[in-house]
Each structure stands twice: as structure tokens, then as C-alpha cells.
Amino acid sequence: MSYVRYIDKTRAYYLKEGYDKPYEWAHFDDVPFTPLTKPLSECRATIVSTSDIAIREDESADHTQEMFVGNAYVIPSDTPVERLYSQQEHFDKHATHLDDVDSFFPITRLREAEAAGRIGSIAKRLHGVHTSYSQRHTLEIDGPLVLERCREDGVDVAILTPI
Amino acid sequence: MSLVARYLEANGIPTVMIANGRDIVEHCGVARLVFVDFPLGNPCGEPGAVDQQREIFEMALSLLETATEPRTTVEAPFQWSKGDKWKDLIFSEEQRFLDEEATEHWLEAKARYKERKAEGKV
């Protein structure tokens, strides 16, 4: 079975929901490309994710009120995976769940790659970017913030995982 | 997410995306994509399927090494263990994407974003 055409499906879906102006998905003709110039085993890697990944501070707190809003933020890469979670709601909750953090924020897999020498090291900070309300916000605020932090941390490669 | 990938890539950091929404990512255009044909939410493999997650992660690492041009997509060789029914149901009339509570959260968050933007906080 072929893969889902989300652009077409969501357009039809939201039209029926009463939104007459279809969402304009970002589109570019040109695509930037930076080749990898040194062995991966010498590279420092980070993760960037729009999964609303968060650190569990207090099990009883309802973080929903603070979700989804704000600029790009960081997760210390030594955070135990047991303390990470997501309350993101924009996924296919009829088909799956987000109980396994590594299914959308592969921090354990990253640690395994470091332990095996497949990558050189893990950057001290991993990154969260909120599913934006504005492509302009993503380009003008979040992108530069993530880039600046990656440069400070000496990041060589980034693995990006949307939800 | 694709926009951030492009931004990093344009500024000298090689990136690889692992994603479920192939058309959305390719419509935007990124350097490297590992497409995983699973429901939105689990780009890096099925929950609890550690070996599968390892293979997908390794595909991403390999793609960083092997891609020689932008828009390089590879597809993970896995099928969702519970079948493909989810593909018909997602964003369909019989199955709403967001329930009322989630829709409410979304609208609240949008309003908060506007407020904070007006205050110069985002």
C-alpha cells in the first residue's frame, strides 16, 4: 500500500471541517546541502525534534497549559530517558502512542551509537522546536537559535525527528 | 521541522530527518530523509521494537555518510505490525484527527502564542 498523502488528505479534511483556506505547506525549489566532511566516528551529534519533548519534573502537574508555545528550547543530553515524555497531541493517537520516547526522540539509540564508536560524541544539548504557528517564526527565531546552540556545542551533525 | 533542517544545512551542519510524513517533507525539500511508513508519532520505529529502532537509526547515520546530493530519500523496509488500516482512517470523515479536548488545547495554544507574540516574548 502506498504512503499517505498528508497534504491532499488534510486539505480535504479541513475543508469539510469548515476551514475554507487550505494550509500552505512550505515549498522550495532549491534545497541546501552540506556534505559530511569527516568520519562519523569523529562527529558530535545532536537531536532536534518537534515532538514537544519535555522533562518530567512533577508527575502530577498538567503541562498541557504550557505546551506548544514558545521558542526553541534545550534538553540536557544526560537526562535519563525515564524522565523524558511528550504530551504532544498532534499524532495518530488512534493507531499508536508516545509512551516509548525512543520511538520519536531516539536518545537511547544515540547513546548506543556513541558507546559503539559509530559517532564520536553526543552534544551536551538536544533541541526541541514547537510545531510552529508561523513558518516565519521557525525561520527567523527557531532556526537561528538552534544553529547558535549547535555551534556553541561543536555539533557536526543533526538528526531531526518531527512528529 | 523541515525548515529547521534546511536552515542548519544552509549554515554548514549536515542533517538527516527521520519522518513519517513523506510528502510534507519532500514538498518542502530537505537534504536527507529516512522515510518510515508508520502512523504519525513514531518516526523512529514502533514503540518497544528496539531492534527495529536500531536499524532505522543506523539508516539515518548511513545516509549522513552516503548522500551526495540534496533530496536524498531512503525508505525503511518495515511495515506497521498492525496492518495498513490506519492509512485509510487518518484524516478521514469517520475518524477525527483531534478530539474535542485536543482541539481546545490547540486553539488555546494558538491564542497564547498570539498573546506572547504581542508582548514580544516569542
Image: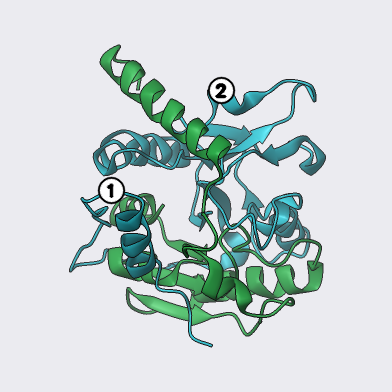
Q: Amino acid at mark 1?
A: Tyr
Quick one: SS at disc 2?
helix
Near mark 1 (Cα within 10 A), the count class, few <14, some 14-19 or many ≥20, is: few
The colour with which the image depicts chain B is: green
Whole-Å distance between the Cαs marked 1 and 2?
25 Å
Q: Is residue A86 visible?
A: yes
> Which residue is depicted at the point 46% across and 38% down?
A130
Q: Is residue B48 left or right of residue B1?
A: right
**Contact (Cβ within 8 Å) of mark 1 with mark 2:** no
Q: Residue furthest left?
A: A29
Identify by letter the chain in cyan.
A
**Viewer-side residue, A55 vs A124:** A55
Q: Is residue B36 visible?
A: no
Near mark 2 (Cα within 10 A), the count class, few <14, some 14-19 or many ≥20, is: few
Going from the N terminus, do you reach mark 1 or mark 2 first? 1
Relative to A102, does residue B111 appear above or below in the rendering?
Answer: above
**Where residue B115 sits in the image (x, y, percent)?**
33, 17
**Viewer-side residue, B118 vs A115:** B118
Q: Amino acid at mark 2?
A: Gln
**Viewer-side residue, B61 vs A117:** B61
Q: Which residue is mark 2?
A: A65
Relative to B113, does residue A113 appear above or below in the rendering?
Answer: below
Q: Which residue is mark 1?
A: A19
- Chain letter of mark 2 equals A
Quick one: SS at disc 1?
loop
Indicate the quadrant containing the C terminus of chain B: top left, top right, bottom left or bottom right. top left
